[in-house]
Image: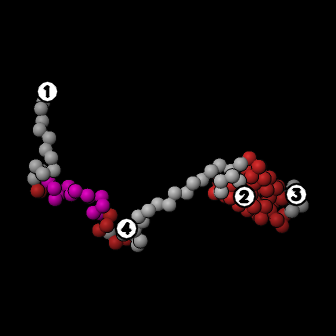
Amino acid sequence: MCAEKRTTREERPASLESAVGTNFVTDVRYRLPSWRPVFPIRHEVPVNLTPPSFPIFFLSLLAGGAGIAAKLGYLPLAGFAFWLVALGFVLLLFGTLFRGL
C-alpha cells in the first residue's frame, strides 16, 4: 500500500491556494455584476401546501370540464368557457393554499 500524506489547507503552498481559491464559485458569482442579487435573500418563507379535499377537487374538475365542453360546443355556455376553466384553477389554488378546504 502506498501511504500518502494528506496536506491540510495550512500546509498547502501559497501558489496552489491562489490558483484554486478558497471559494471559487462564490468569488466568480459575485465578481460578475449581472449575477449579483439586488436584494440579498436571507430568509425563505415556507409555504405549507396541502392537497385539496375531494369536494374541492371534484368541483374544480367539474368547472374545468364544463369549460372545455363549452368551448368544444357540447354545452351552450361558449361565452363562459374561459371563466369556467379559470374557476376550476382558482378552486384548486384555494384548495392547496388553505388547510381544510
Residue for badge 4: 35
- Residue sitting nearer the eye, 11 or 35: 11
Label 2 vs label 3, nearer the camera? 2
Would residue 89 be visible to someone looking at this image?
Answer: no
Residue for badge 2: 91
Residue 22: where, in percent of width, then height? 22, 56
Q: Tell me the quarter of the image containing the N terminus.
A: top left
Whole-angstrom CA distance, mark 2 to mark 3, is 21 Å
* Residue positioned 12% across, 30% down in the render: 2
Residue for badge 3: 75
* Residue positioned 55% across, 57% down in the render: 47
* Neighbour tally class for label 1: few under 14, some 14-19, many 20 plus, Cα within 10 Å: few
Q: Is residue 81 magenta?
A: no
* Neighbour tally class for label 2: few under 14, some 14-19, many 20 plus, Cα within 10 Å: many
State the image quarter where residue 40 is shown. bottom left
Q: Is residue 95 left or right of residue 12?
A: right
For this orientation, the residue located farthest to the top is 1
SS at mark 1 in the image: loop
Q: Return the mark for residue 1.
A: 1
Whole-angstrom CA distance, mark 4 to mark 2, is 38 Å
Please report whichever mark, 2 or 1, sits nearer to the chain's N-terminal start. 1
